[in-house]
Amino acid sequence: MLDEADQKILALIQKNAMLTAQELGERIALSPSQAARRRARLEAEGYVTAYAARLDAAKLGLTVQAFVQVQMATHAPERARTFHSLIDTLPEVVNAWTLTGEADYLLQVWCADLPALNVLIHERLLPHPAVARVQSQIVMNQLKRFGGLPL
């Protein structure tokens, strides 16, 4: 069970994973060693699964973000496995979910430009034998970025 201090630590480190034990302790009124021990325990218990940096897509030349819905022609297990393998090989696909409803998969993609998105859809996704239909929505403006899980 998480206490209030644990929740505060998780909230702080999901906003800035580079906070030191000294900084964490100051912000939640614990000693640096207590803050460090609690953080280590939260990591060991699996509450913290990874640390990563958020990169600026535009500075990296990625100007098109899109959500791509994929409807499968078949749900045979082997076809699904080969589709999952394909998704794993596509660096443009940054998130992928299986869904209920009309679409079977939702892919979040980042591409350099519209021609690159076109290649991804028409030369990589649509040729897969299990794919029946692909529909894309291009992000015009991102109003809110992932700010962490609600605690």
Image (tube, grey):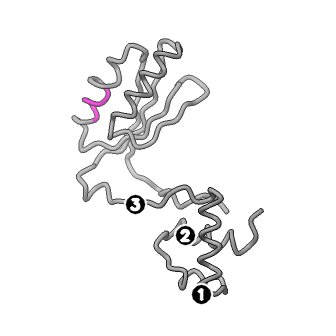
Magenta-colored stretch includes residue 96: no
Query: Nearest the camera: 9 or 141?
Result: 9
Quarter of the image with the C terminus in it:
bottom right
Per the image, label 2 sits on a secondary structure element best described as: helix
On residue 54, the disc is 3
Could you tell me which residue is drawn at 76 percent across and 70 percent down?
3
Query: Nearest the camera: 33 or 9?
Result: 33
Kindly identify which residue carries mark 2.
13
- Name the kind of residue labelled 2 in the image: Ile
On residue 26, the disc is 1
Could you tell me which residue is drawn at 63 percent across and 58 percent down?
47
First reached walking from the N terminus: tag 2 or tag 1: 2
Magenta stretch prevailing secondary structure: helix
Q: Quadrant of residue 108?
A: top left
Q: Quadrant of residue 125?
A: top left
Provide the residue span drawn in magenta. Answer: 117-121
Are the residues at dot 3 and dot 2 in contact (C-beta closer than 8 Å)? no
Give the Cα distance between marks 3 and 2.
13 Å
Are the residues at dot 2 and dot 1 in contact (C-beta closer than 8 Å)? no
First reached walking from the N terminus: tag 3 or tag 2: 2
User: Percent from the top left, x then y, of residue 86?
Assistant: 37, 27
User: Percent from the top left, x then y, of residue 54?
Assistant: 40, 60
Per the image, label 1 sits on a secondary structure element best described as: helix
User: Percent from the top left, x then y, of residue 43?
Assistant: 59, 62
Nearest to the eye among marks 3 and 2: give it: 2
